[in-house]
Amino acid sequence: MIPLPDLPRPACSDEEWQTRVELAAAYRLVALFGWDDLVFTHISARVPGEPGAFLINPYGWLFEEITASSLVKVDAQGQKLTDNPFPINPAGFTIHSAVHAARDDAHCVLHTHTLNGVAVSAQQAGVLPLSQQSIFVLSSLGYHDYEGVALRDNEKPRLVEDLGRGNYLMLRNHGLLTVGRDVPEAFLNMYLFESVCAIQVRAQAGGACTHVNPDIIAGARQQAAQVTKGLGAQLVWPGLLRRLSRRMPGYDA
């Protein structure tokens, strides 16, 4: 067995450390929920007070191994800003740098390759209005056609245009992407997105499906604010951290 190095806590502001802890928690929660794809997807978060800088995973670490100290800080050109011996995923940088640069409100960007998500992304009709969960995704959803592994800068404008001002992006034949005003919001958005895809695949396997009335989808954002009492993702995030501390402690190291 090759052990991971014990990386020291980086010198940073309290605000950056809090973001690191939340982002590391999101990585481990993705693993806990079974959405990880070995080391091949990514989550990023903006560094508070440092325009253009964001945090992303050290390439080669499993999501269940990520800690707050291990996260790599990079600038808008992908140059490391902290002393970290691990590289970053080049495809991850292309996708995340594009979204962070274009969306001031996208403080966290989360991308997955789940079986359910990729299955629905391969369907011509995309997400269908089959469930209560689907109305929240459909009210803020874009689609981006597959162009191969995301390694080319010239794909960035199309990706950003397809996301628009939405919070959900289906990457055709590839997977799912969500954004959030913070880490908890991006995670909750992905929970909904993944749930929608899992329900759709199962519902389609059972035969003919009933669709939700489009008028209901139009009011989904207002309904989401009501059902969470205006707290949004903060309603569930503390509980998720408690679950993570019980089952997969150590993310805040």
Image: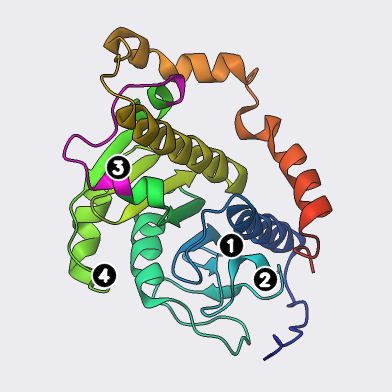
Instruction: Tell me which amino acid carries mark 2.
Output: Glu
Q: Main secondary structure of the magenta part?
A: loop
Q: Are marks 2 and 1 in contact (CB under 8 Å)?
A: no
Q: Which residue is mark 1?
A: 47
Residue at (61% x, 43% y) in the render = 184
* Cα gap from disc 2 to disc 4, whole angstroms: 25 Å
Q: Are marks 3 and 2 in contact (CB under 8 Å)?
A: no
Whichever of labels 1 and 4 marks the residue nearer the N terminus, that label is 1
Query: In the rendered structure, which segment of residues is drawn in magenta?
Result: 119-133
Instruction: Tell me which amino acid carries mark 1.
Output: Val
5 vs 227, left or right, is right
Q: Which residue is mark 2?
A: 65
Q: Which residue is mark 3?
A: 120
Q: Quadrant of the N terminus?
A: bottom right
Q: Quadrant of the C terminus?
A: bottom right
Neighbor class of circle 4 (other Cα within 10 Å; few <14, some 14-19, many 20+) is: few
- The vertical placement of 218 against 198, above or below, is above
Q: Is residue 130 one of those drawn in magenta?
A: yes
Q: Nearer the viewer, mark 1 or mark 4?
A: 4
Neighbor class of circle 1 (other Cα within 10 Å; few <14, some 14-19, many 20+) is: many
Q: Is residue 158 one of those drawn in magenta?
A: no
